[in-house]
Amino acid sequence: MYYLTNGGVLMYFILLMSIIGLSAVIERFIYFFKNEKNNRSYIPKEVKSCLEKGDVKSALIFLNKEHASTSKVLKEILIEMYKNPNASTQKLEEKAKEKAMIQIKLLERNMWLISLTAHLTPLLGLLGTVTGMIKAFQSVAMHGTGDPSVLANGISEALFTTAGGLFVAIPALIFYNYFNKKIDRIIGDMEITTTELINNFRG
């Protein structure tokens, strides 16, 4: 409360953004832990074994137990293969692309909130710095320079908001880049496994 009361009204906006950013980070951690912890950059050997025998249904049953994005895209291809054994490579690629786009949206959900927190809070801190310095010089103009505390109060408000903005923005930026790297890796895995499955099926 000390920092909030001494940092001015903008500290409350920074606090609000920190809550929003933290909520988004927690939600993303839960999502990736529940859904992407078993993500693979290769086709599971169980699926390969089934496909080699021409048993698409068993491969689907195996993938149906998986929650990772790569598994869901592979499952979409296998569903099309099961319904239409003569499906063209283009048709399978279209199905894979459609499902991949859905998965990418899920992977990127709430990422904009983390990005907003990382970019907006330093600006709020900077705005607090400007308003704090304005107050400081206004106080000096009104009361003179005889009392140093008059100037110190305005400067302290300016520094509190600057520190508050950076304190929130730096972790938000770290988490944003961490999740982005994870998303890029999963997208790459989807592309690799999709290509491998379609080539294996068509070959």
Image (tube, grey):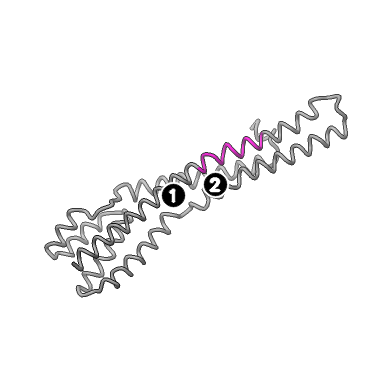
Residue 94 as seen in the image, left or right of residue 58: right
Over which residues does the magenta segment extend?
160-173
Return the residue nearer the eye: 198 or 159: 198
Which amino acid is tagged 2?
Ile
Q: Give how far apart the Cα atoms at labels 1 and 2 are.
A: 18 Å
Residue 49 on image: x %, y %:
14, 57
Where residue 145 sits in the image (x, y, percent)? 85, 27
User: Residue 2: which disc?
Assistant: none
Q: Which label was assigned to residue 20?
A: 2
SS type, badge 2: helix
Of badges 1 and 2, nearer the viewer stands: 1
Say which label, 1 or 2, has the lower sequence index.
Answer: 2
Q: Which residue is mark 1?
A: 180
* Residue count near mark 2 (Cα–Cα under 10 Å), binned few <14, some 14–19, many ≥20: some
Q: Main secondary structure of the magenta part?
A: helix
Which residue sits at x=16%, y=62%?
51
Secondary structure, mark 1, is helix
Look at the image and tell me in which quarter the C terminus lies. Answer: bottom left
User: Furthest residue to the left?
Assistant: 53
Quadrant housing the N terminus: top right
